[in-house]
């Protein structure tokens, strides 16, 4: 396991660089929710231990191959147990990464590390959808470039070639990034998520289920984003998008049956089954194009905003029922992009709304305390409509409070006593009080409002915007009434607003141009680039010409001056080097390099080889030339190390 063998500096440099390549691939997979931390954790621990101990910590190639074969048989067993093919292959790659980490430090093993790192990165491109994937991707580009340059120069005749300075390689990084961006835009897209089960941990959104308990609600306002909404239009329609999208209700699940302590969804037959990539039309009104980026969630409901006209190319099989609730057949385990057309009015999808059921008029579970409260509030009402308005205004005058104590056995009674609570309590009390007057009612859970992102020009809907309201059957249709007081929306101020807007804008750009990049997006991006070139083409040409003129002037005059200075420093250094060698009985012809002469007896061969590499890097390579005092310092260090 350990060895006292001394390794050449170039080989040690390759050891660190190829380990960095492999770690970049492992880090990219660590961001995936489909990969177990056990697999990538073992590779990370072994790689960090190898970086600390160096090549002294290694196994033979035969011993390392046993780890790879063990991983192969283990993953074959995983497939028999039902593991997805893509995830099982990734598990095997991570076990293989562990094997090549602990393998002996040979040039062949360095090549193995680079290849496995590349395969890990490709697997992560399928399994990872986080914006942070950019970090290991950029690190992989850099370390792969440096490692390839280092391995290319190993074991050349006469000695290892020096690696170019990092500053010289950095000049090519923009070219590498540009080539990658062009390939990304040009290459077709392949869909792999259909091969995966919904293993990704999904957001828990309390209330978006077919059964809700009144005491089951969040005590804290949650800042996690559940939807990002932006316009797909241009020009005037895009500039008016904020005015149209803010302040809308996003309808989710409708709950009709009150149990005494909560709500349940009534049996609602599905009126239409939708296949993937099909369209759903609600009305023929003209709308504004809208893209909704939906985070992975633990419920199947598609939240429909007021005024939705149509939904194009629904990404998964879905269905719409007799209360106008649109839901996927199963809760998707990944982010989805929905294309909607929104009208300027607040119309709802009435064509799918059925008349009320008998249970939506049921009064059997109305608490006696609520009946007494309704009688007191509406004592002076001139009719049912006026009584309904009086109850609505009375509830709106109370206080919104997430932390009010709720009696699980008698939630409505405790709410009426405290005159404060959360939106489900307000909606439940109003819905039941309206039923006691003879109206058909139901409670609807969804979202309201949202935060406008000034940087990216889109709407953010967070968990804290989850809301409950009431639908009442009036004048032959379902009318929305919201009894929650306006103070509900005064408690949602964000901290670090500027940073949050920048971060969310970056996330949306990642989802739009990377995760959800389609042919239509490619065409839109090309149109934007064309418009920018037409608008700023002349200025861009002038800027390029000015940069080229500055570079040409610098290379012609400053470059000559620097070369002259370096030649002078080299002449002085060579003279001092020849004097130092003659004192030790070693002669050197003027055209003879240091690597061609024997090393001084008082200096070990290894240290002399290291010194010669450093000398040639400054004499012939791109590193700064040694001055007289620099050479003396190196020679003193060379003698002290003997």
Image: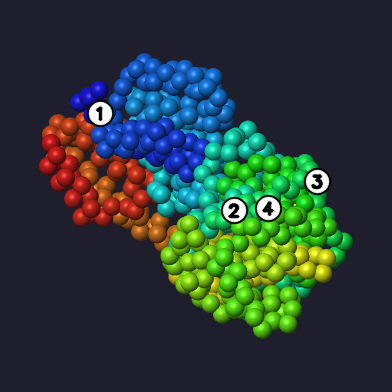
Q: Where's the N terminus, which quadrant?
A: top left
Q: Mark 3 = which residue?
A: 272
- Separation of residues labelled 2 and 4 (CA atoms): 25 Å
Q: Residues within 10 Å of mark 1 (few under 14, many from 20)?
A: some
- For residue 259, the mark is 2
Percent position of residue 14, x then y: 37, 35
User: Is tag 4's residue or tag 1's residue first in the polypeptide sequence?
Assistant: 1
- Say which of marks 2 and 3 sits in front: 2
Are the residues tagged 4 and 1 within 8 Å (C-beta)?
Answer: no
- Say which of marks 1 and 2 sits in front: 2
Most distant residue in the right direction: 284
Query: Regarding mark 4 in the picture, which secondary structure is present there?
Result: strand
Which residue is at 64% across, 47% downward? 300
Of 36 and 162, nearer the camera is 36
- Separation of residues labelled 3 and 4 (CA atoms): 15 Å
Q: Residues within 10 Å of mark 4 (few under 14, many from 20)?
A: many
User: Is tag 2's residue or tag 4's residue first in the polypeptide sequence?
Assistant: 2
Are the residues tagged 1 and 2 within 8 Å (C-beta)?
Answer: no
User: Is tag 3's residue or tag 1's residue first in the polypeptide sequence?
Assistant: 1
- Say which of marks 3 and 4 sits in front: 3
Query: Regarding mark 3 in the picture, which secondary structure is present there?
Result: strand
Q: Mark 4 = which residue?
A: 302
Are the residues tagged 3 and 4 within 8 Å (C-beta)?
Answer: no
- Separation of residues labelled 1 and 2 (CA atoms): 69 Å
Of 576 and 534, nearer the camera is 534
- Separation of residues labelled 4 and 1 (CA atoms): 57 Å
User: Is tag 1's residue or tag 2's residue first in the polypeptide sequence?
Assistant: 1
Q: Is residue 12 left or right of residue 166?
A: left
- Say which of marks 2 and 4 sits in front: 2
């Amino acid at each position: 396991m350990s060895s006292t063998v001394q390794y050449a500096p170039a080989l040690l440099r390759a050891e660190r660089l190829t380990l960095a390549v492999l770690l970049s691939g492992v880090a990219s997979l660590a961001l995936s929710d489909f990969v177990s931390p056990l697999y990538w954790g073992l590779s990370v621990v072994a790689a960090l231990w190898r970086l600390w101990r160096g090549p002294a910590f290694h196994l033979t190639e035969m011993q390392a191959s046993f780890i790879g074969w063990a991983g192969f048989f283990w993953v074959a067993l995983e497939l028999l147990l039902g593991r997805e093919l893509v995830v099982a292959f990734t598990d095997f790659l991570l076990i293989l990464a562990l094997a090549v980490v602990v393998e002996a430090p040979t040039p062949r093993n360095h090549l193995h590390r680079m290849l496995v790192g590349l395969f890990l990165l490709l697997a992560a491109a399928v399994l990872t959808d986080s914006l942070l994937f950019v970090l290991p991707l950029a690190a992989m580009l850099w370390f792969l470039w440096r490692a390839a340059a280092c391995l290319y120069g190993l074991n050349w005749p006469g000695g290892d070639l020096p690696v170019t300075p990092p500053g010289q390689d950095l000049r090519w990084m923009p070219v590498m990034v540009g080539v990658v961006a062009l390939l990304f835009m040009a290459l077709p897209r392949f869909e792999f998520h259909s091969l995966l089960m919904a293993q990704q941990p999904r957001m828990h959104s309390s209330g978006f289920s077919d059964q809700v308990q009144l005491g089951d609600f969040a005590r804290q306002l949650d800042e996690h984003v559940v939807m990002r909404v932006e316009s797909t239009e241009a020009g005037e329609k895009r500039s008016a998008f904020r005015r149209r999208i803010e302040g809308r209700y996003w309808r989710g699940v409708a709950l009709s049956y009150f149990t005494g302590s909560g709500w349940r969804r009534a049996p609602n037959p599905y009126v239409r089954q939708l296949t993937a990539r099909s369209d759903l039309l609600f009305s023929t009104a003209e709308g504004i194009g809208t893209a909704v980026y939906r985070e992975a969630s633990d419920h199947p409901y598609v939240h429909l905003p007021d005024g939705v006209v149509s939904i194009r190319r629904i990404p998964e099989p879905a269905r719409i029922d007799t209360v106008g609730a649109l839901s996927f057949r199963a809760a998707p385990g990944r982010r989805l992009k929905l294309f909607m057309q929104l009208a300027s009015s607040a119309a709802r999808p009435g064509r799918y709304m059925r008349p009320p059921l008998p249970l939506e008029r049921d009064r059997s579970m109305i608490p006696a305390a609520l009946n007494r409260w309704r009688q007191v509030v509406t004592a002076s009402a001139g009719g049912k409509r006026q009584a309904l308005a009086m109850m609505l205004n009375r509830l709106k005058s109370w206080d919104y409070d997430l932390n009010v104590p709720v009696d699980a056995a008698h939630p409505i009674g405790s709410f009426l006593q405290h005159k404060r609570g959360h939106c489900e309590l307000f909606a439940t009390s109003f819905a039941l009080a309206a039923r006691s007057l003879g109206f058909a009612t139901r409670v609807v859970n969804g979202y309201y409002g949202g935060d406008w992102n000034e940087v990216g020009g889109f709407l953010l809907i967070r968990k804290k915007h989850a809301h409950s309201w009431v639908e009442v059957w009036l004048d032959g249709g379902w009318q929305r009434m919201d009894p929650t007081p306006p103070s509900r929306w005064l408690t949602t101020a964000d901290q670090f607003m500027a940073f949050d807007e920048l971060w969310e804008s970056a996330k949306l750009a990642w989802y739009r141009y990377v995760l959800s990049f389609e042919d239509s997006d490619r065409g839109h991006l090309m149109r934007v680039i064309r418009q920018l070139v037409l608008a700023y083409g002349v200025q861009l040409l002038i800027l390029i010409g000015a940069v080229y003129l500055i570079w040409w002037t610098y290379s012609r005059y400053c470059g000559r001056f620097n070369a002259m200075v370096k030649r002078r420093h080299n002449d002085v250094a060579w003279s001092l080097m020849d004097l130092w060698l003659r004192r030790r009985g070693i002669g050197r012809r003027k055209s003879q390099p240091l690597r061609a002469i024997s090393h001084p007896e008082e200096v070990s061969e290894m240290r002399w080889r290291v010194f010669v590499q450093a000398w040639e890097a400054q004499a012939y390579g791109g590193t700064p030339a040694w001055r007289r005092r620099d050479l003396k310092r190196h020679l003193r260090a060379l003698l002290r190390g003997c």
